[in-house]
Amino acid sequence: MPIKEQKFIWSNGELIPWADAKVHVMTHALHYATSVFEGMRAYQIKNGHTVIFRNFEHIRRLFYSARVYRLPIRHSIEEIMQACRDVVRENGLKAAYIRPLVYLGYGEMGISAPHEKAETMIAAYPWGAYLGEEALKSGVDACISSWRRLAPDTMPAGVKASGNYLSSRLIALEARERGFGEGIGLDAAGTVSEGAGENLFVVMNGKLYTPPGASSILMGITRDTIITLAKSRGYEVVEQALTRESLYAADEMFMVGTAVEVTPVRSVDRLPIGSNNRPITT
């Protein structure tokens, strides 16, 4: 989906013109993927105000991801949270997708380059349904990818690092090339992990099942929200390893994440999920 340019981007403590937000081609992150990020959404609510969905939890995870890769953030959590509000407000956005990014900047090469060059930026712009409005309404057709997710002892799957999404890209591209709307990756053990960029929930016999953290998933903030909401409505939520064939037995299935929000899955490997009656997903 094309990026809709805005007036400002927040960069290292100040709002600068969108067109001035540039990096050198020798920036470390371009060569070694030394960057971490968040995806967030702002929504206009009933009283007309615009709010950022779980701003604190997203920024706290950004700091965690940066700490794992030794990328120092020069600002506090509160300052980054306020910067997210500022970039939405100053661009006049009622609803927006927000992208904070921390990356190792220009200055040195080499995998173990010093950490002092970390930069922080935040962009905000309008972004509609990630998999399309029709997918939100009717569901997406998904497939099991031939690409496995990262094993726990290779790279930290629970960290929202840019390099992790090279795996996601392969899964998504393979799905599109095969005529599907989205792909689903398996973990190193061969059980279900997550979609290319989404967590998964399966509904069977009135219970919700979702892969656990040990299945090489990102512990999504939208995932956590869905678990909380489901339990508050009396649904049992089970976090356990799921086999590929268990997806075929689902009564309902849906994907969740900041970009995808809550999108039903209509079929997996061309096998319809349930009867397309989705009371729990709805």
Image: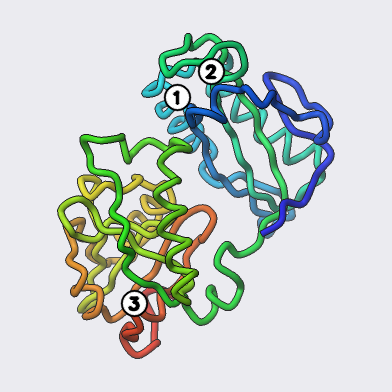
Residue 25 shown left or right of residue 269 in the figure: right
What is the number of the mark on residue 262?
Answer: none
Residue wearing tag 3:
268
> Tag 1 or tag 2, which sits nearer the N-term?
1
What's the residue at 54%, 38% (across, down)? 55
What amino acid type is highlighted by mark number 1? Ala
> Tag 1 or tag 3, which sits nearer the N-term?
1
Pinpoint residue 122: horizontal percent, then vertical percent: 65, 33
Q: Label 1 near label 2: C-beta < 8 Å?
A: yes
What amino acid type is highlighted by mark number 2? Ile
Q: Quadrant of residue 160?
A: top left
Mark 1 secondary-structure assignment: helix
Residue wearing tag 1:
66
Residue wearing tag 2:
73
> Tag 3 or tag 2, which sits nearer the N-term?
2
Q: Name the one closer to the observer, 110 or 220.
A: 110
Mark 3 secondary-structure assignment: strand
